[in-house]
Image (spheres, rainbow, N blue to C red):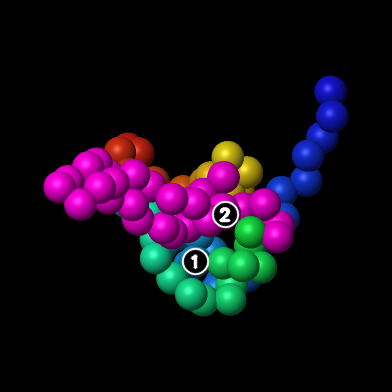
């Protein structure tokens, strides 16, 4: 079995992943021009994409923004403090 090393995030990277994670839970993509997202996209933690919300009389409703990749979700969840996990018994 191959061992995968999880990279250690800086506080800024962790906060940025937290914002994207919160946006996904709310059913949206994060719209931001911050350079940190470009850097994390290079690392494979986030990706820029388009979310199609529906159609109206003018055509498709498209929203562009950042979403987490599977690697980004894994890294974010592995580095969350255990006391901040929702639903965990205390």
As drawn, the residue found furthest toward the front would be 58
Coordinates of residue 57 in the picture (x, y in percent): 15, 47
Q: Residue at x 20, y 52 (%)?
A: 58
Q: Residue at x 38, y 47 (%)?
A: 51
| Residue 57, above or below 19 | above
Secondary structure under the numbered disc 2 in the rendered image = strand
Please give the range of residues in magenta: 42-69
Q: CA distance from mark 2 to mark 1?
A: 10 Å
Q: Residue at x 78, y 39 (%)?
A: 4
Side (left or right) of 31 relative to 37: left
Q: Residue at x 56, y 53 (%)?
A: 47
Coordinates of residue 7 in the picture (x, y in percent): 72, 55
Q: Residue 1 in magenta? A: no
Please state which of residues 78 and 50 is positioned toward the viewer in this rendering. 50
* Residue at numbered disc 1: 16
Residue 47 at least partly seen = yes
As drawn, the residue found furthest toward the top would be 1
Q: Quadrant of the N terminus?
A: top right
Mark 1: few, some, or many residues within 10 Å (few <14, many ≥20)?
some
Q: Earlier in the sequence, mark 2 or mark 1?
A: 1
Question: Label for residue 46?
Answer: 2
Q: Quadrant of the C terminus?
A: top left
Side (left or right) of 83 relative to 1: left
Magenta-drawn stretch, dominant element (helix, strand or loop): strand
Coordinates of residue 89 in the picture (x, y in percent): 32, 37
Coordinates of residue 15 in the picture (x, y in percent): 48, 67
Please state which of residues 75 and 26 is positioned toward the viewer in this rendering. 26
Side (left or right) of 81 relative to 83: right
Mark 2 and mark 1 residues within 8 Å of each other at the beta carbon: yes
């Amino acid at each position: 079995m191959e061992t995968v090393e999880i990279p250690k995030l800086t506080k800024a990277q962790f906060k940025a992943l937290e914002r994207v994670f919160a946006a996904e839970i709310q059913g949206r993509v994060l719209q931001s021009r911050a350079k940190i997202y470009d850097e994390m996209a290079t690392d494979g933690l986030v990706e820029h994409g388009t979310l199609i919300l529906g159609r109206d009389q003018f055509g498709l409703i498209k929203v562009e923004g950042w979403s987490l990749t599977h690697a980004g979700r894994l890294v974010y969840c592995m580095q969350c403090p255990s006391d901040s996990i929702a639903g965990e018994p205390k």
